[in-house]
């Protein structure tokens, strides 16, 4: 019952002991854990609800904190996996996978002949009422973060208030992370890639390009080599983007064989599906190191739901890097917004949880001047955040490598205190979780026994590394 908590924080397991008491009900449903977190699973005390509305049973009130142990009425490993894999959606018909529906097949059949205006109108009709969707939370859902932070707070209490060390989420003490990606959907988008690389580079930013290998457009070796040689990443985007990749498990497995062929041909480590259709329980058939198809909250996407986290996580052998911000098409053509106000709000919310802000900007949709100007404002804002040493601006492949290395690191107790061991540990930052009043706070500074907690900034690790920001 402590697997996801220990994996999330990379903290000593002996300091994070959670046990479930009582026999859990066979019924799965929604319940609360504190004032903001909505869980999906089974509990041994109280009742669950089939939908995330109304007054939910608060399992936080059932928690029992004893010396060295936290007793819970639910299994947090089950709840976190249900959220990350969107298993709560299976009980909600409006969120069921739409890829096999007749309407979706018809839409993709005529899509090449529809202008953006017609598509926008149809999509707005389908999405009407989306703002009333109670769960996941809009515009960023941080349920997984809330659950983990609450559990760690209870573990600190169970250890007589002593701080718990953990491996900080990002290398060199960066507070959060940003990754910029580009899905290329049309021939016009493909032909705009070189100009888009020029634009990204003008702000000192590298990004990844996800390319459709079949039917949509042709790809030549010189085109692929140009992306690689300029230091950008090259990934696979679906197979042919016809909306049918997940129509059935048999069809997915058949297409996965061809997708894996293109992964090897491109030398690609990452994958994203068309229109973010997904079923992470099937994705073990894909031979990629990382996957990027799970949105944080999918209110504006064809398939509803959302993974409810702003952190990468393992989906089988692959690292899932969730898409945590609104896509450019949805911003411009569904919301009708050509400002970066929503993106800035999402960056702020994600930053507060020290997560990753992943952007998907299509070259196809920023060709016209108004959209391009909005994207330039976003690039400038990202560049400003980087210059303030608040965030790690990384390629998805770099995030994947760091998350894999961090998952293999361990905290060990030495005579002079705690230390981190493992590959890449020289970039890792030792952090501490402690209580200030009833709230859990993070710091890079260990507190000597008997002294007051010191929360705030600390010196930089070494010349050129960012000083840790104020943590919470």
Image (cartoon, rainbow, N blue to C red):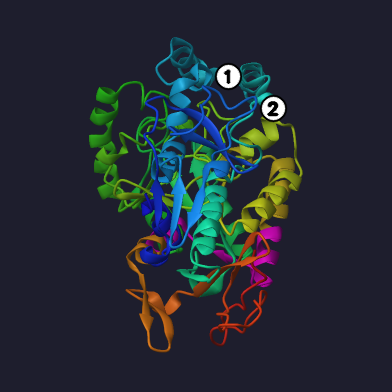
In this view of the protein, which residue sits in the foreground, 18 or 89?
18
Residue 235 vs 225, above or below: the answer is above
Which residue is at 50% across, 20% downward?
92
Q: Is residue 104 above or below residue 379?
A: above
**Which residue carries the number 1 mark?**
114
Residue 381 counted in the magenta span: yes
Q: Residue furthest front?
A: 66
Q: Is residue 43 depicted above or below 71 in this figure?
A: above
Residue 151 location (% of width, % of height): 51, 53
**Residue 83 against residue 373 in the figure, above or below:** above
Circle nearer the N terminus (1, 2): 1
Predominant SS along the magenta part? helix
Q: Secondary structure at mark 2?
A: helix
Can I make out residue 68 in this image? yes
Which residues are drawn in magenta? 380-401
Left or right side of 245 for 258: left
Q: Residues within 10 Å of mark 2 (few under 14, many from 20)?
A: few
Where residue 311 appears, as percent x and y from the top left, is: 50, 52
Given residues 310 and 4, the one toward you in this image is 4
Quadrant in which the C terminus is drawn: bottom right
Q: Marks 1 and 2, Cα distance to the nearest angstrom? A: 26 Å
Q: Residue at x 55, y 55 (%)?
A: 149
Residue 180 shows in this picture:
no
Of residues 433 and 24, the one nearer the viewer is: 24
Left or right of residue 178, residue 69 in this image? left
Q: Which residue is mark 2?
A: 131
Judging from the image, what secondary structure is the residue with disc 1 in? loop
Q: Report crowding for label 1: few under 14, some 14 to 19, many 20 or more residues within 10 A (C-alpha).
A: few
The quadrant in which residue 296 appears is top right
């Amino acid at each position: 019952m402590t697997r996801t908590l220990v994996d999330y924080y990379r903290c000593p397991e002996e300091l994070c002991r959670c046990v479930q008491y009582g026999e859990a009900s066979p019924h799965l449903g929604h319940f609360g854990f504190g004032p903001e977190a909505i869980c999906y699973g089974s509990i041994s005390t109280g009742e669950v609800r089939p939908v995330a509305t109304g007054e939910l049973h608060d399992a936080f009130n059932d928690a029992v904190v004893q010396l060295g142990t936290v007793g819970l009425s639910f299994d947090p490993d089950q709840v976190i996996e249900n959220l990350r894999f969107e298993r709560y959606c299976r009980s909600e018909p409006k969120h069921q996978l739409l890829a096999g529906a007749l309407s979706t097949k018809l839409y993709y059949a005529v899509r090449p002949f529809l202008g953006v205006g017609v598509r926008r109108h149809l999509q707005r009709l389908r999405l009407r009422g989306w703002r009333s969707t109670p769960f996941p939370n809009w515009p960023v859902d941080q349920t997984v973060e809330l659950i983990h932070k609450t559990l760690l707070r209870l573990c600190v209490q169970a250890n007589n208030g002593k701080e718990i060390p953990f491996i900080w989420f990002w290398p060199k003490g960066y507070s959060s992370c940003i990754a910029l990606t580009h899905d290329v959907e049309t021939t016009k988008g493909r032909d705009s890639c070189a100009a888009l690389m020029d634009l990204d580079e003008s702000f000192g930013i590298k990004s990844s390009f996800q390319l459709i290998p079949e039917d949509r457009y042709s790809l030549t070796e010189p085109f692929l080599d140009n992306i690689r040689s300029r230091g950008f990443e090259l990934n696979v985007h679906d197979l042919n983007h016809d909306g049918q990749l997940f129509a059935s498990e048999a069809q997915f497995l058949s297409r996965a064989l061809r997708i894996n062929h293109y992964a090897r041909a491109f030398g690609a480590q990452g994958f994203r599906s068309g229109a973010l259709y997904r079923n992470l329980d099937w994705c073990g058939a894909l031979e990629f190191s990382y996957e990027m198809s799970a949105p944080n909250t999918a209110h504006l996407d064809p398939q509803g739901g959302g993974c409810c986290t702003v952190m990468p996580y393992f989906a089988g052998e692959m690292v899932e890097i969730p898409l945590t911000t609104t896509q450019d098409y949805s911003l411009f053509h569904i919301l009708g917004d050509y400002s970066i106000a929503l993106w800035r709000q999402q960056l702020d919310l994600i930053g507060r949880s020290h997560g990753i802000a992943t952007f998907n900007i299509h070259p196809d949709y920023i060709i016209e001047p108004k959209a391009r100007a909005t994207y330039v404002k976003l690039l400038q804002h990202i560049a400003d955040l980087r210059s303030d040493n608040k965030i790690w601006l990384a390629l998805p492949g770099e995030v994947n490598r760091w998350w894999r290395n961090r998952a293999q690191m361990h905290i060990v107790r030495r005579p002079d205190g705690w230390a981190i061991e493992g590959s890449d540990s020289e970039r890792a930052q030792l952090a501490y979780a402690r209580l200030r009043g009833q709230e859990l706070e993070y710091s890079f500074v260990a507190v000597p026994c008997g002294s007051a907690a010191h929360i705030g900034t600390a010196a930089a690790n070494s010349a050129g590394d960012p000083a840790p920001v104020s943590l919470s």
